[in-house]
């Protein structure tokens, strides 16, 4: 059976959705402008249109083999995955080759041999939409690294949804990379394949914990075990660890959830936090960041700009306490001093904007990354909060002119090395997390640059936007795979 069967069905469905709702770019714009129910409506239409598209293809004399299509379209999993691909095509921004979905064997669908000679390195994930964007660069990186290894016994990297884990540790289905055609293929595996090592991306902390503990009991090596990743999920714990180790990070104050839920106590705690965050010296204007202590990718983070005293800030931003209350419904509240006075020129907006640098630290060293630019006039740069990703095509030079209060910044090798050292020092505080995304915001003061470390993510996103800082080529890491090879050897696997 041709693996392009799933794409044929998806293309027909996408054509019909576009006829009803407009081009994918319009759909993405409408959803981001607040039409949250639009995707639900599209999903219902995809479900309703699916049987008709299958019937059309079965009647098409130039279409695929009819018996195979009939058997495949009757499989619940195949149908679900094809439909999910339609939603991704009309809403997501594809940064990888199309994912080809293979159905389970049965009827006219013949069994296939496993494409792997032995155990695999599993990149386990929970969230399906657009996950191929995160997986693709890792699989390509792993393949390229394996080409340099003289040992013919290699451990291929594959993507494995947690629901595809038989007995919670063997892969019954996987996404693999076929370099000959630059394809991503999702295939059933019969018999299920053993897992030699594992990492987690696009998973919730609860899911990470469950499966990480399972693999730990089986003594299967992990790149970022939950026991270590949970420490990085706590932003205030990171702040304390970094302060102890001399990593530049902005002042922070934690308001426990129980206090933040009581508006009277929350007001008192915020007022007491201002001298800690901003000092006793009067300032014309400051920025206080208010965010969930365990939030990720900028979700729930808001910046409030105003006078450096709580009474004045409370008058200017009466909604600040309400935002604290909203966060406290599910988390502790973290207050941070807003930092950074450098701006980058955004060629899209043609304006100077705030930015953060995402640095992927692999096996202890900065290797790749990208820039996150805030919308004009905004402070938070995360895409989930309205920012956008800028690819770093010619590192280590910035992707645009960088300016600050003293004019343009001289971006030389020493400036870049200062940034690298800060990110590597931040990651070194969590040594068992072997691939992390470290976010830095830059400040020019006293004739030097300060790379303020904001966050560290043990399940980094945006990997398809990453470029190697040494070459400017797309990619995430080459160091990681040798480190993983050594980790497996130490655990007794011996490959």
Image: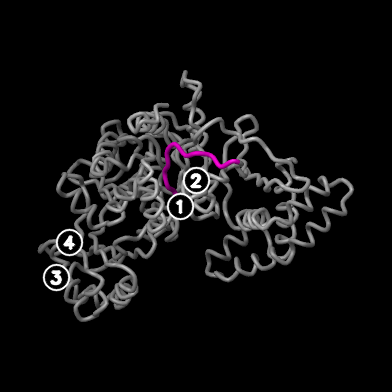
Residue receiving disc 4: 277
- Which residue appears at 49% of the width and 36% of the height? 120
Q: Nearer the viewer, residue 456 or 433?
A: 433
Residue receiving disc 1: 202
| CA distance separating discs 4 and 2 | 36 Å
Residue 272 is labelled as 3
Residue receiving disc 2: 134
Q: Is residue 85 left or right of residue 493?
A: right
Which mark's residue is nearer the viewer, 4 or 1?
1
| CA distance separating discs 3 and 1 | 37 Å
Tag 1–tag 2 contact (CB < 8 Å): yes
Q: Is residue 63 left or right of residue 232?
A: right
In the rendered image, residue 491 lying in the magenta stretch gets the answer: no
Which mark's residue is nearer the viewer, 3 or 1?
1
- Which residue appears at 26% of the width and 44% of the height? 430
Query: Magenta residues?
Result: 191-202
Q: Is residue 78 left or right of residue 238?
A: right
Q: Is residue 90 visible?
A: no
Looking at the image, residue 463 lies above or below residue 18: above
* Position of residue 400 measured from the top left corner of the image (x, y, whole percent): 41, 42
Tag 4–tag 2 contact (CB < 8 Å): no
* Position of residue 72 measured from the top left corner of the image (x, y, whole percent): 73, 51
* Position of residue 456 measured from the top left corner of the image (x, y, whole percent): 31, 49
First in sequence, mark 3 or 1: give its number: 1
Looking at the image, residue 253 lies above or below residue 482: below
């Amino acid at each position: 059976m041709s693996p392009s069967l799933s794409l044929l069905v998806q293309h027909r469905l996408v054509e019909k959705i576009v006829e009803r709702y407009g081009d994918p770019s319009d759909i993405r714009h409408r959803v981001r402008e607040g039409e949250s129910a639009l995707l639900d409506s599209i999903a219902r239409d995809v479900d309703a249109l699916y049987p008709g598209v299958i019937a059309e293809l079965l009647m098409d004399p130039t279409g695929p083999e009819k018996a195979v299509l009939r058997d495949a379209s009757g499989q619940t999993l195949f149908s679900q995955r094809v439909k999910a691909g339609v939603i991704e095509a009309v809403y997501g921004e594809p940064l990888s080759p199309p994912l080809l979905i293979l159905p389970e064997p049965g009827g006219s669908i013949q069994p296939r041999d496993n494409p792997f000679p032995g155990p695999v390195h599993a990149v386990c994930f929970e969230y399906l939409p657009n996950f191929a964007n995160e997986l693709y660069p890792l699989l390509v990186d792993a393949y390229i690294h394996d080409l340099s290894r003289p040992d013919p016994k290699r451990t291929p990297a594959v993507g494995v949804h947690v629901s595809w884990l038989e007995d919670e540790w063997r892969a019954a289905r996987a996404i693999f990379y076929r370099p000959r055609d630059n394809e991503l293929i999702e295939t059933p595996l019969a018999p299920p394949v053993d897992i030699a090592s594992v990492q987690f991306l696009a998973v919730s902390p609860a899911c990470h914990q469950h499966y990480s503990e399972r693999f730990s009991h089986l003594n299967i090596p992990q790149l970022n075990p939950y026991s270590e990743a949970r420490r990085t999920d706590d932003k205030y714990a990171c702040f304390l660890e970094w302060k102890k180790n001399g990593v530049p990070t902005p002042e922070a104050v934690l308001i426990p959830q129980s206090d933040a839920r009581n508006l009277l106590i929350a007001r008192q705690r915020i007022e007491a936090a201002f001298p800690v965050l901003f000092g006793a010296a009067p300032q014309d204007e400051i920025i206080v960041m208010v965010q969930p202590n365990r939030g990720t990718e900028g979700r729930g983070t808001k910046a409030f700009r105003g006078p450096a005293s709580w009474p004045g800030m409370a008058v200017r931003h009466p909604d600040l306490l309400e935002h604290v209350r909203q966060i406290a419904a599910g988390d502790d509240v973290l207050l941070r001093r807003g930092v950074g006075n450098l701006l980058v020129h955004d060629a899209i907006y043609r304006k100077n904007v705030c930015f953060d640098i995402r640095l992927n630290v692999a096996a202890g060293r900065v290797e790749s990354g990208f820039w996150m630019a805030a919308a004009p006039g905004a402070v938070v740069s995360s895409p989930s909060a309205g920012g956008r990703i800028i690819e770093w095509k010619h590192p280590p030079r910035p992707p645009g002119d960088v300016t600050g209060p003293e004019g343009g910044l001289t971006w030389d090798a020493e400036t870049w090395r200062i940034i690298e050292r800060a990110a590597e020092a931040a990651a070194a505080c969590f040594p068992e997390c072997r691939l992390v995304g470290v976010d830095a915001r830059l400040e020019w003061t006293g004739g030097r640059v300060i790379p303020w470390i904001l966050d560290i993510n043990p399940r980094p996103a945006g990997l398809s936007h990453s470029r190697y800082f040494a070459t400017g080529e797309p990619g995430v890491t080459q160091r990681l795979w040798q480190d993983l090879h050594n980790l497996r050897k130490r655990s007794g696997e011996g490959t």
